[in-house]
């Protein structure tokens, strides 16, 4: 692998932390993103010439901070801000391309990185922004998701999401880039949880690209959920989200076969599920349930726990899962949740019971081009023996998805039914 490939790969993983560090200094998200990009350009120039640093992530962090400091100097900041910068001798004296011969304190950087990232989440979820803008902006900054990926998560047009992100950045320029106090933190929490949830979802089932999974996003979401557990130990939904993500992440080792093809939940080798993550998830769920009436994330964690507790696919308590989705829909009416419930009904009560539910959902505007609806219809039709209709539904789902691995699987299923 070339130095350029390594630099680009590390940058993709560290991008959100880099933006968070620069944003803390600059209080301008556009400029912070530019600094992170400039750091990558510096790495692409320096690493092939000078060799790869021992700690590439820390190198990029120092380069990003230096770029931000240069911008601050060019702005001719007020005297007190210059004094604040002067206190950091290492940062003030560093070159644009950092020199790691001077024994960079990597441990200190790693400690700061976590605080910066969490701070950036709460900043991007500022109450001056509408909820949709909070989530879209944070997904862009933290998840590193492209606008098209965020649009898919919202089931909305890409242009709408792009405009939302631009307006959100402008609204936040000049705001205090500090972790809010307990009262403000609570006000922003629901948006923060939604962001962490959507980051994990994109990692768990990538909406586009050549890979089904993006493990770095799953790891990031898990880390953030665990940080939130420490920050807000008495909030039931924080623990509920953590339980959901821990249990979902436990299945990742079994989601692909040896050739990299997706393995559906009923066909997964459950011996490959991560037992430690399951235990962590069940413990978080117990904690969430002990703190009060379950909210949406706790209910989803309870549904995930039904799968985790089943030693075999045939042991799954699908009736309990349907009941869980009933409670979830009562709290959070959503066509996607209704779709998941319909799939559960197909296993609890048979495919014939689920088909009318899926047909009704096909009229939902948000699901018109949703590949998972077409895939669910195809599976139910196949189980009912309606082979021709199932094949057409598989082809429709393949046409709608932007993920190459999912498209290949769907086309294989359609081809199998044609023979």
Image (cartoon, rainbow, N blue to C red):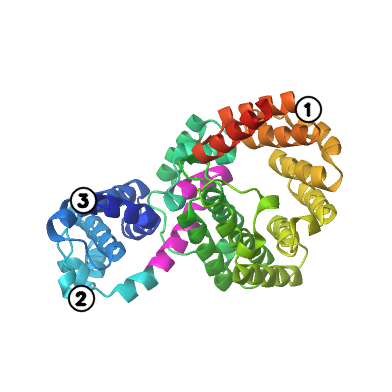
Identify the secondary structure beneath mark 2. loop
Would residue 134 be found to the left or right of residue 351 on screen? left
Would residue 45 be found to the left or right of residue 403 on screen? left
Residue shown at the point (16%, 51%) measured from the top left = 45
Residue shown at the point (44%, 53%) measured from the top left = 142
Q: Quadrant of the C terminus?
A: top right
What segment is highlighted magenta in the picture? 113-140
Q: Position of residue 153 (x, y in %)?
A: 57, 41
N-terminal of the pair, mark 2 or mark 1, is 2
Q: What residue does disc 1 label? A: 386
Q: Position of residue 313 (x, y in %)?
A: 75, 56
N-terminal of the pair, mark 3 or mark 2, is 3
Q: What residue does disc 3 label? A: 44
Q: Position of residue 97 (x, y in %)?
A: 17, 59
Residue shown at the point (42%, 48%) measured from the top left = 144
* Residue 366 can be seen, yes or no: no
Q: Which mark is residue 103?
A: 2
Q: Residue furthest front?
A: 419
Mark in front: 1 vs 3: 1
- Image height check: is 196 above or below 343? below
Q: Nearer the viewer, residue 182 or 124?
A: 124
Q: Residue furthest left?
A: 49
Marks 2 and 3: in contact by CB < 8 Å? no
Tell me which secondary structure the magenta stretch mostly adopts: helix
In the rendered image, residue 115 lying in the magenta stretch gets the answer yes
Cα separation, mark 3 vs mark 2, equals: 22 Å
- Image height check: is 218 above or below 416? below
* Residue 34 can be seen, yes or no: yes
In the rendered image, residue 197 lying in the magenta stretch gets the answer no
Identify the secondary structure beneath mark 1. loop
């Amino acid at each position: 692998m070339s130095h350029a490939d390594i630099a680009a790969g590390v940058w993709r993983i560290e991008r959100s932390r880099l933006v968070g560090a620069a944003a803390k200094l600059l209080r301008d998200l556009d400029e912070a993103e530019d600094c992170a990009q400039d750091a990558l350009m510096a790495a692409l120039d320096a690493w092939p010439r000078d060799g790869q640093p021992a700690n590439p992530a820390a190198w990029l962090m120092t380069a990003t901070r230096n770029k931000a400091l240069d911008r601050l100097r060019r702005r001719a900041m007020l005297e007190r801000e210059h004094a604040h910068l002067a206190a950091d001798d290492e940062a003030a004296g560093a070159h644009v391309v950092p020199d790691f011969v001077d024994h960079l304190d990597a441990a200190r950087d790693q400690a700061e990185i976590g605080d910066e990232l969490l701070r950036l989440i709460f900043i991007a979820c500022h109450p001056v922004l509408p909820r949709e803008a909070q989530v879209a902006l944070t997904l862009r900054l933290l998840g590193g998701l492209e606008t098209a990926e965020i649009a898919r998560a919202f089931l909305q047009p890409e242009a709408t999401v792009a405009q939302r992100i631009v307006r959100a950045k402008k609204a936040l320029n000049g705001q205090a880039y500090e972790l809010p106090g307990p009262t403000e933190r609570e006000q922003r929490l629901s948006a923060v949880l939604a962001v962490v949830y959507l980051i994990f979802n994109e990692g768990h089932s990538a909406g586009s690209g050549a890979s089904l999974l993006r493990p770095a996003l799953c790891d990031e979401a898990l880390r953030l959920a665990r940080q939130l557990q420490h920050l807000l130990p008495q909030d039931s939904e924080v623990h509920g989200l953590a339980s959901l993500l821990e249990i979902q992440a436990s299945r990742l080792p079994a989601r692909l076969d040896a050739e990299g093809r997706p393995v559906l939940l009923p066909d997964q080798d459950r011996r490959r599920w991560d037992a430690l993550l399951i235990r962590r998830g069940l413990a978080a769920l117990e904690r969430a349930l002990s703190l009060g009436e379950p909210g949406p994330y706790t209910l989803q964690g309870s549904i995930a726990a039904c799968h985790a507790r089943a030693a075999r696919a045939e042991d799954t308590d699908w009736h309990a899962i349907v009941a869980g989705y009933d409670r979830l829909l009562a709290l959070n009416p959503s066509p996607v949740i209704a779709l998941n419930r319909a799939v559960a009904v197909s296993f609890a009560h048979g495919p014939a019971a689920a088909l009318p539910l899926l047909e009704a959902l096909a009229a939902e505007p948000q699901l018109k081009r949703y590949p998972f609806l077409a895939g669910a219809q195809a599976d139910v039709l196949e189980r009912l023996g309606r082979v021709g209709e199932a094949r057409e539904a598989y082809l429709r789902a393949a046409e709608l998805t932007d993920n190459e691995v999912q498209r290949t699987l769907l086309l294989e299923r359609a081809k199998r039914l044609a023979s």
